[in-house]
């Protein structure tokens, strides 16, 4: 039997949803979302070398966020692959006021979470962390795309998005495709839709993603006569960019979740590494796939010289699921490893809490409380084995 690609599976599910929609009545004042959301999986399939398991590995054990969900086609498809999915959309601007996604959820017997929010003004997400965010055809509907993308980069390990791009002005007299510029459409200039705002050039889209904490791993365009002639408003000039990116702001490790007590990544040198300061108390959770007996915790960190400036040593304590490990004292600046062993540990989510006996600040120069520095640019700094 031939191997089913991610795109094959998405098209099979599209046909299934079409049948379900034909049998599911909607309020007579609205209609189903008319665009084929799952068609974008052609590009995600290519980005992942036609391997559905590659998508599952990126998601890991975390949920998926479908932002700007339409009728939820993407969310229900990913649920069919085994993912836990949240949808977020703004009911006043959703094509049918979210009646479509609610009707499909009931018809499919789905457990997809449906959440109403205007992320443009208050980007609060249903969960603290996602393995993947899907955002198809949403970016040009946002007044504040920088805010939304930066928020997502702190709460999602990967993002797959599509958006319209432009290289020339509507009159085709100015070519801005090679510059980090965006075209702001007028209220009725694009599809008579006042919820359209920013159409980015390729260069500005890539810069926007980089500056909001994303590293682009795959990029493609489709439509019109090519990206070089894309314009922001005409049907014939409609060119779409498809992007798969990974966050620099979150932990790159599947099953590893930062909880309380972590500061944002340091911007200095972010192209080459990800360093975070902790507070005096900080915590993480790990998804342990198998029970351990015994269970040894290893935590790698950097003790900066300023932390030791007023004291000769620093003591670190840890608890694992509430069980205390022996404290350790460090008296030199530089790289250190804390380790401790428990008799046994069951599989599942493991809560690890750390506490330092002292920290820097806050001060006039830096209002943060600063404990130790942790490097997230290479191997995981925290392990259970």
Image (cartoon, grey):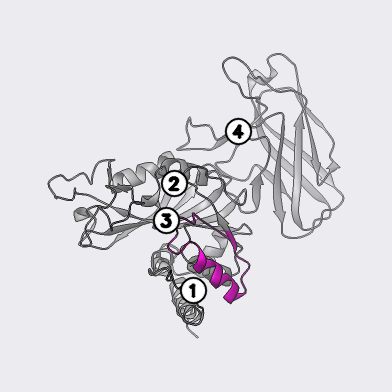
Q: Is residue 93 magenta?
A: yes
Q: Which residue is mark 1?
A: 26
The residue at 48%/36% (across/down) is 270
Query: Which label is found at residue 143?
Result: none
Q: Which residue is mark 2?
A: 215
Identified at 49% across, 32% down, the residue is: 267
373 or 322: which is nearer to us?
322
Count the marks: how many? Answer: 4
| Mark 3 and mark 4: Cα distance apart in space | 27 Å
Dot 2 crowding, Cα within 10 Å, few <14, some 14–19, many 20+: some
- Label number found at residue 161: 3
In the rendered view, would you say 312 is above or below 276? above
Picture coordinates of residue 207 (x, y %)?
A: 36, 42
Please report contact status of discs 1 and 2: CB closer than 8 Å, yes or no. no
Q: Name the residue beneath numbered marker 4.
A: 263
Element on which disc 1 rests: loop
Is disc 4 placed on a helix, strand or loop? loop
Part of the protein shown in magenta: 86-114
Spatial separation of the CA atoms under disc 1 and disc 4: 47 Å
Earlier residue among tags 4 and 2 = 2
Q: Is residue 302 above or below residue 24?
A: above
């Amino acid at each position: 039997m031939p191997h089913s690609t991610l795109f094959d599976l998405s098209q099979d599910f599209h046909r299934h949803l079409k049948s379900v929609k034909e049998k599911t009545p909607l309020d007579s004042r609205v209609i189903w979302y008319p665009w084929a959301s799952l068609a974008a999986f052609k590009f995600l399939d290519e980005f992942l070398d036609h391997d559905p398991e590659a998508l599952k590995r990126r998601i890991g054990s975390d949920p998926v966020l479908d932002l700007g969900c339409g009728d939820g086609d993407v969310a229900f498809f990913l649920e069919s692959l085994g993912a836990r999915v949240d949808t977020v959309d703004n009911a006043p601007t959703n094509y049918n006021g979210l009646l479509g996604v609610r009707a499909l959820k009931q018809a499919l017997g789905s457990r997809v979470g449906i959440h109403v929010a205007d992320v443009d003004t208050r980007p609060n997400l249903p969960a603290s962390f996602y393995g993947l965010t899907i955002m198809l055809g949403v970016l040009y509907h946002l007044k504040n795309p920088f805010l939304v993308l930066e928020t997502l980069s702190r709460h999602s390990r990967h993002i797959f998005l599509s958006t319209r791009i432009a290289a020339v002005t509507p009159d085709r007299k100015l070519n801005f495709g090679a510059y980090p510029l965006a075209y702001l459409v007028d209220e009725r200039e694009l599809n008579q839709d006042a919820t359209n705002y920013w159409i980015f050039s390729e260069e500005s889209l890539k810069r926007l993603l980089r500056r909001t904490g994303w590293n682009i791993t795959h990029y493609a365009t489709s439509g019109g006569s090519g990206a070089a002639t894309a314009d922001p408003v005409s049907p014939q000039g409609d060119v779409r960019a498809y992007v798969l990116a990974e966050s620099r702001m979150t932990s790159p490790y599947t099953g590893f979740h930062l909880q309380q007590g972590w500061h944002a990544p340091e911007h200095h040198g972010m192209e080459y590494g990800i360093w975070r300061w902790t507070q005096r108390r900080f915590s993480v959770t790990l998804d342990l796939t198998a029970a351990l007996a015994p269970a040894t915790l290893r935590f790698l960190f950097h003790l900066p010289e300023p932390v030791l400036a007023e004291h000769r040593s620093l003591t670190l304590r840890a608890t694992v699921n509430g069980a205390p490990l022996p404290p350790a004292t460090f008296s030199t600046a530089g790289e250190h490893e804390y380790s401790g062993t428990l008799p046994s540990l069951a599989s599942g989510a493991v809560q690890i809490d750390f506490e330092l006996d002292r920290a820097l600040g806050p001060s006039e120069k830096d209002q943060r409380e600063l404990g130790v520095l942790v490097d997230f640019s290479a191997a995981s700094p925290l392990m259970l084995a």
